[in-house]
Image (cartoon, helix red, strand yellow):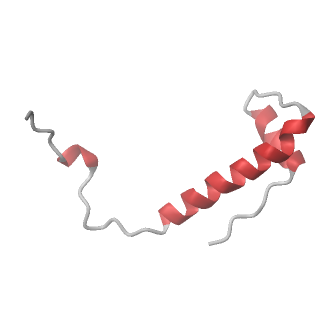
Amino acid sequence: MSVPQLSPEEAAESALRAGLSLDSDRHAVVAATAHHILTVISRLRELDFAEVPPATAYRVQDR
C-alpha cells in the first residue's frame, strides 16, 4: 500500500489544525517525517496477528 507524499504546505496546514505553528523552514522536514511515519504504520497494518494473543494475556513473572 502506497502512502501519498504530503506537500510542505499540507504538512503546515495539518500542524496548524493540531494547534502547532511551524516556521516555514520546518515544513519540508515535517512533511518528510510524517510520510515516513505513515509508511511504517501502513506496513504494520498489513501484518497478520491473528494467532498472537493481546498484550494483556501475558504475565510478567518475578525472578
State the residue at coordinates (23%, 44%): 56
* In-front residue for pair 23/9: 23
Outermost residue toward the front in this view: 63
- Where in the figure is residue 31, as x and y percent of width and height? 78, 49
State the residue at coordinates (78%, 60%): 5
State the residue at coordinates (10%, 38%): 61
* In-front residue for pair 33/10: 33
Quadrant location of residue 59? top left
Apparent side of residue 34 relative to residue 21 in the rendered image (left or right)? left
Apparent side of residue 49 relative to residue 8 in the rendered image (left or right)? left
Apparent side of residue 48 relative to residue 3 in the rendered image (left or right)? left
Quadrant placement of the N terminus = bottom right
Apparent side of residue 15 relative to residue 49 in the rendered image (left or right)? right
> Relative to residue 34, is residue 19 depicted above or below?
above
State the residue at coordinates (34%, 65%): 49
Q: How many badges with numbers are in the image? A: 0
- Where in the figure is residue 26, as x and y percent of width and height? 84, 38
Outermost residue toward the bottom in this view: 1
Quadrant placement of the C terminus = top left
* In-front residue for pair 8/56: 8
> Relative to residue 1, is residue 42 depicted above or below?
above
- Where in the figure is residue 53, as x and y percent of width and height? 23, 57
Quadrant location of residue 15? top right
- Where in the figure is residue 10, as x and y percent of width and height? 84, 48
